[in-house]
Amino acid sequence: MAVTDPVDARLLAALADLGKAAVHELAARVGMDPR
């Protein structure tokens, strides 16, 4: 999938960062190693 709009690219990057942060937070909350 090609992203031509830089705003879309930034939005996708922000969503990916939020997703990673959420996974990391959930893992920490249940005591798992996020790696």
Image (tube, rainbow, N blue to C red):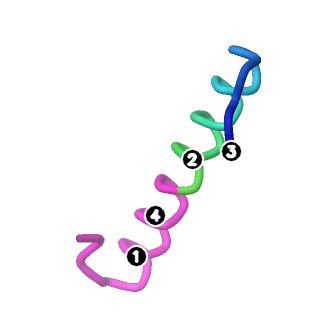
Q: Which residues are magenta?
A: 20-35
Chain-order first, disc 2 or disc 1: 2
Q: Does residue 10 belong to the magenta stretch?
A: no
The amino acid beneath tag 1 is Ala
Characterize the local packing of mark 3: few (<14), some (14-19) or many (20 or more) Cα atoms within 10 angstroms.
few
Q: Residue at x 56, y 47 (%)?
A: 16
Chain-order first, disc 2 or disc 4: 2
Circle 4 residue = 25
Q: Which numbered marker is on residue 1?
A: 3
Q: Toward the viewer: 24 or 2?
A: 2
The x, y position of residue 25, in whole percent, is 46, 63
Q: Which numbered marker is on residue 27?
A: 1
The amino acid beneath tag 4 is Glu
Circle 2 residue = 16
Q: Quadrant of the C terminus?
A: bottom left
Quadrant hosting residue 4: top right
Give the CA separation, mark 2 to mark 4: 14 Å
Residue 34 vs residue 12: left or right? left
Tell me whether circle 3 and circle 1 mark residues in contact (CB < 8 Å): no
Tell me whether circle 4 and circle 1 mark residues in contact (CB < 8 Å): yes
Chain-order first, disc 4 or disc 3: 3
Front tag of 3 and 2: 3
